[in-house]
Image (cartoon, rainbow, N blue to C red):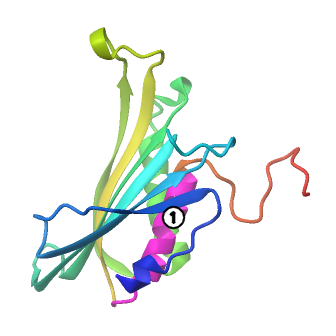
């Protein structure tokens, strides 16, 4: 847990402790990450995620180990992106590339990428339609230092939020 707590994400990402689901394993721990909007508002983020650490000292065959990391990331889409046949492939690559670039060794990686569209009606009617992409995945880390996995998770959330790589400014942006 200490290696997960030590993560220092880029400034556009806000971390917060989170209650982990207690029934998934004998020991659990979790945190959430939200991408701050351009105006600095994280009250209703367009992109958010959570990373859950599971530990079962007896191990589980499907995990291929005693630890398991489970993640969920949700990002708002522009309406024209919904239905893009390549979006699930791109979404999955955000995770696999983040793990690879962080050097986060793992086994037993699996998950799903889902596109959703929601329109509110009746008493919960809202002013807009929500189109989202959701990535759910889990993997077993190799080794006990999980800092690279936490870094990879933060990179995944940044990619889903459409943030440029660290140190890269969008065209037309001036350095202060």
Please indicate whether residue 60 sits to the left or right of residue 16 in the image. left
In reply to whether residue 156 is colored magenta, the answer given is yes
The residue lying at 49 percent from left, 36 percent from top is: 76
Q: Which residue is mark 1?
A: 154
Q: Is residue 36 depicted above or below 60 in this figure?
A: above
The residue lying at 65 percent from left, 46 percent from top is: 40
Q: Position of residue 41 (x, y in %)?
A: 60, 43
Q: Is residue 77 depicted above or below 128 in this figure?
A: below
The residue lying at 48 percent from left, 32 percent from top is: 84
Please indicate whether residue 87 sits to the left or right of residue 125 in the image. right
Q: Foreground residue, 59 or 42?
A: 42
Q: Position of residue 106 (x, y in %)?
A: 35, 79
- Write down the region rendered in magenta: 144-159
SS of the residue under disc 1: helix
Quadrant containing the N terminus is bottom left
Q: Position of residue 35 (x, y in %)?
A: 55, 51
Q: Foreground residue, 110 or 51?
A: 51
Q: Is residue 95 depicted above or below 88 in this figure?
A: below
Q: Main secondary structure of the magenta part?
A: helix
In reply to whether residue 75 is colored magenta, the answer given is no
What number of labels is visible? Answer: 1
Q: Position of residue 140 (x, y in %)?
A: 28, 76
Q: Is residue 94 depicted above or below 77 in this figure?
A: below
The residue lying at 44 percent from left, 29 percent from top is: 131
Quadrant containing the C terminus is bottom right
């Amino acid at each position: 847990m200490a290696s997960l707590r030590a993560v220092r994400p880029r400034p556009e990402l806000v971390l917060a402790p989170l209650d982990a689901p207690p029934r998934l394993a004998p020991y659990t721990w979790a945190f959430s990450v939200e991408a701050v909007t351009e105006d600095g508002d994280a009250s209703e983020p367009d992109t958010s995620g959570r990373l859950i650490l599971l530990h079962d000292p007896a191990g589980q065959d499907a995990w291929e180990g005693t630890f398991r990391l489970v993640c969920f990331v949700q990002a708002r889409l522009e309406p024209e992106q919904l239905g893009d046949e390549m979006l699930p492939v791109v979404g999955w690559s955000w995770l696999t590339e983040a793990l690879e670039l962080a050097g986060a060794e793992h086994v037993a990686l699996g998950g799903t990428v889902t596109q959703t569209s929601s329109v509110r009606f009746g008493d919960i009617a809202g002013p807009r339609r929500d189109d989202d992409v959701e990535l759910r995945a889990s993997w077993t880390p190799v080794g006990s230092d999980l800092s690279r996995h936490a870094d990879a998770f933060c990179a995944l959330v940044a990619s889903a939020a459409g943030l440029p790589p660290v140190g890269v400014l969008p065209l037309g942006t001036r350095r202060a």
